[in-house]
Amino acid sequence: MTRPKKNNYRDRPVMVTGGAGFIGSALVRNLCAQGARIVVVDNLINGKRNNLADLDPGHVRLVEIDIRERDTMRTILANVKTVFHLACLGVRHSLHDPMENHSVNATATLHLLEEARHANVERFVHVSTSEVYGDTRTAPMKEDHPLQPNTVYGAAKLAGEAYARAAYLTHRFPVTIVRPFNTYGPRSHHEGDSGEVIPKFLLRALAGKPLLVFGDGKQTRDFSFVDDIARGIAAAGKNPRCLGRTINLGSGKEISINTLAQLIGKVVGDEIKIERHPARPGDTRRLIADIESARRLLSYQPSVALTEGLQHLL
């Protein structure tokens, strides 16, 4: 097998599934800055056209389809060099529609891997999630931490990972898996199944409403600014040392939801109130990433501190 070369995004178009979404649109911006021509595949269930509206249409083309439309995906892949696979349905969605969640996050990932392999795609980056870990057993969480997800979302994303690894081990298809931990920043989701805690907290604080905390608020998360995560994902598609690897992307720091609520109050500059609700099904108690592999393989170093990122998002 010929040793793979470092990827150059200027050669042939790059596909980003879910590229009109929160993290996807940040990744598209990063790739644009590297001179890439990008095909964004998004059904706009969670993504938005406005997330890409300011980008050069000569470099970014949006194809509004569901990734489960295999014939159309096959046609697009025929001229694609690199695939970044972010399209998915989230944690809350999996609680009320587990079958569709599995269909998109697991089955469609397998189909996409097969179509990409037959199209001779040169690099495939599967964007997974820290939710595959489930509850923390050792901290910080290394990539070889036990994988026991609490939700169908986490289980389906783990199945997608397993299919990606199988494509590498069976066919030497050039796959890399990245596991972003909690992400926040511009164009983050605040509504519906994909709504995230930081934008929800900020919006409620600005409106003078109490912040909704589920459970005792002592659960912790590892938050990263979206541009840092996008930079790590893009780097994973370039470095040949990443092939066959699974890599965490996070800050390497944890903060409780109670402390986050108080920090939001300081950033907004107003006293906040907390409204407590019962713990939600499937919520993990603790998440904190070990990012040594990302540092070593991707030269990854988070650059935006949480307070700075919150002020920017505000």
Image: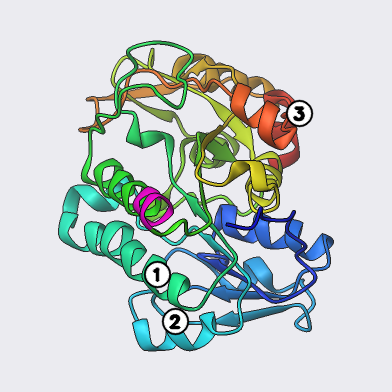
From the image, give the main secondary structure of the stretch colored magenta. helix
Numbered range of the magenta stretch: 165-170
Q: Secondary structure at mark 3?
A: helix
Q: Secondary structure at mark 2?
A: helix
Vertical arrangement, residue 230 with respect to residue 308, above or below:
below
Count of numbered tags: 3
Q: Position of residue 233 (x, y in %)?
A: 63, 47
Discs 2, 1 touching: Cβ within 8 Å: yes
The quadrant of the rendering that contains the N terminus is bottom right
Relative to 55, 138 lies left or right: left
Q: Name the one closer to the observer, 200 or 132.
A: 132
> Which labelled disc corresponds to residue 308?
3
Discs 2, 3 touching: Cβ within 8 Å: no
Query: Marks 2 and 3: which is nearer the front?
Result: 2
Indicate which disc, 1 or 3, sits on the residue closer to the N terminus: 1
Looking at the image, which residue is at 73% across and 56% down? 5
Identity of the amino acid at label 1?
Answer: Leu
The quadrant of the rendering that contains the C terminus is top right
Vertical arrangement, residue 56 with respect to residue 298, above or below:
below
> Which labelled disc corresponds to residue 112?
1
Identity of the amino acid at label 3?
Answer: Glu
User: Which residue lies under the disc numbered 2?
Assistant: 73
Discs 1, 3 touching: Cβ within 8 Å: no
Q: Name the one closer to the observer, 130 or 174.
A: 174
Q: Residues within 10 Å of mark 1 (few under 14, many from 20)?
A: many
Residue 43 can be seen in this image = no
Here the colouring is rainbow
> For the residues marked 2 and 3, what is the alpha-carbon distance in whole angstroms?
39 Å
Looking at the image, which residue is at 75% across and 82% down? 57
